[in-house]
Image (tube, rainbow, N blue to C red):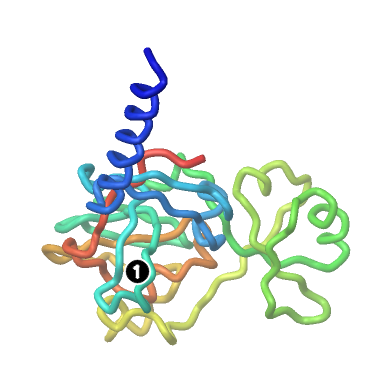
């Protein structure tokens, strides 16, 4: 193959990719928050497509109805229209089944400073600390897979209030909270998304359901 043909093919490929990205068929995004840790790490690049409709537990990208200042959000799809959703201690049950049981999730734990120094400080790369803690208690977000390896039992920290949570979901349910709510039936045309960093994710628990029309595509690979 001569040089001109090689140059032409390269140029054609670049144009092809640009057209696909411009049309939204293929999109790439860089993950800039810890809300889907440990499965979509900060700095990860995702590649997705609008041609693939997300299924439960797929990561997808979307905009909330108010566009959230124009940001595109990447979260895991938890429940689809007509599903019955319940949350127990931060784990999701859909149609009576625990759909989190095979996922490595991240939750907030509280511990004594000496336990943090012994088990966390030098064993976790860049530990994600919660900014609100007392002098005698440290709160840190930790992966399930890591917590299971520890020789001590750590205590979860649970958010109990309903302040700032979605009125569409939590209104008139004073006994529901961030980590425990439901059962609720997902309305027609609505979807429930959540981050895998369950105690540090600004998702459907706060922003409400996602309209089907605002789902832009499904994550195919991340690297």
In this view, the residue in front, 105 or 93, is 105
Report the residue at 57% width, 55% height from top. Answer: 106
**Tag 1, which secondary structure?**
helix
Q: Quadrant of residue 140?
A: bottom right
The crowding category of the residue bearing disc 1, from other C-alpha atoms within 10 Å (few below 14, some 14 to 19, many at least 20), is many
Q: Pointer 1: what residue?
A: 204
User: Where is 89 relative to 223, above or below?
Assistant: below
Residue that extends furthest to the top in the rendered view of this protein: 1
Image x and y of residue 98, in percent = 37, 48
Report the residue at 81% width, 61% height from top. Answer: 116
In this picture, residue 39 sits left or right of residue 72 = right
Report the residue at 34% width, 49% height from top. Answer: 27
Q: Quadrant of residue 3?
A: top left
| Residue 56 in view | no
| Residue 133 in view | yes
In this view, the residue in front, 15 or 96, is 15
Residue that extends furthest to the left in the rendered view of this protein: 188
Image x and y of residue 37, in percent = 55, 53
Report the residue at 32% width, 54% height from top. Answer: 78
Image x and y of residue 190, in percent = 19, 64
In this picture, residue 176 sits left or right of residue 209 = right
User: Where is 209 relative to 9, above or below?
Assistant: below
Image x and y of residue 181, in percent = 36, 69
In this picture, residue 71 sits left or right of residue 113 = left
């Amino acid at each position: 193959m001569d040089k001109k043909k090689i140059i032409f093919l390269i140029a054609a490929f670049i144009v092809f990719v640009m057209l696909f990205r411009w049309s939204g068929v293929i999109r790439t995004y860089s993950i800039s928050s810890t809300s889907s840790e440990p499965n979509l790490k900060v700095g990860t690049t995702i590649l997705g497509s609008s041609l693939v409709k997300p299924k439960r537990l797929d990561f997808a990208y979307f905009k909330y109805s108010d566009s959230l200042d124009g940001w595109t959000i990447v979260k895991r799809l938890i429940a689809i229209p007509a599903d019955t959703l319940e949350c127990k201690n931060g784990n999701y049950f859909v149609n009576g089944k625990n759909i989190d049981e095979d996922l490595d999730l991240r939750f907030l734990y509280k511990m004594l400073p000496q336990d943090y120094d012994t088990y966390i400080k030098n064993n976790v790369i860049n530990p994600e600390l919660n900014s609100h803690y007392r002098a005698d208690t440290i709160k840190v977000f930790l992966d399930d897979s890591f917590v299971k390896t520890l020789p001590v039992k750590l205590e979860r920290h649970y958010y109990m209030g309903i302040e700032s949570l979605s009125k569409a979901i939590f209104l008139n349910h004073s006994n529901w909270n961030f980590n425990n709510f439901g059962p609720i039936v997902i309305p027609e045309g609505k979807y429930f998304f959540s981050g895998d960093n369950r105690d540090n994710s600004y998702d459907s628990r706060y922003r409400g359901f996602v309209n089907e029309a605002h789902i832009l595509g499904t994550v195919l690979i991340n690297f």
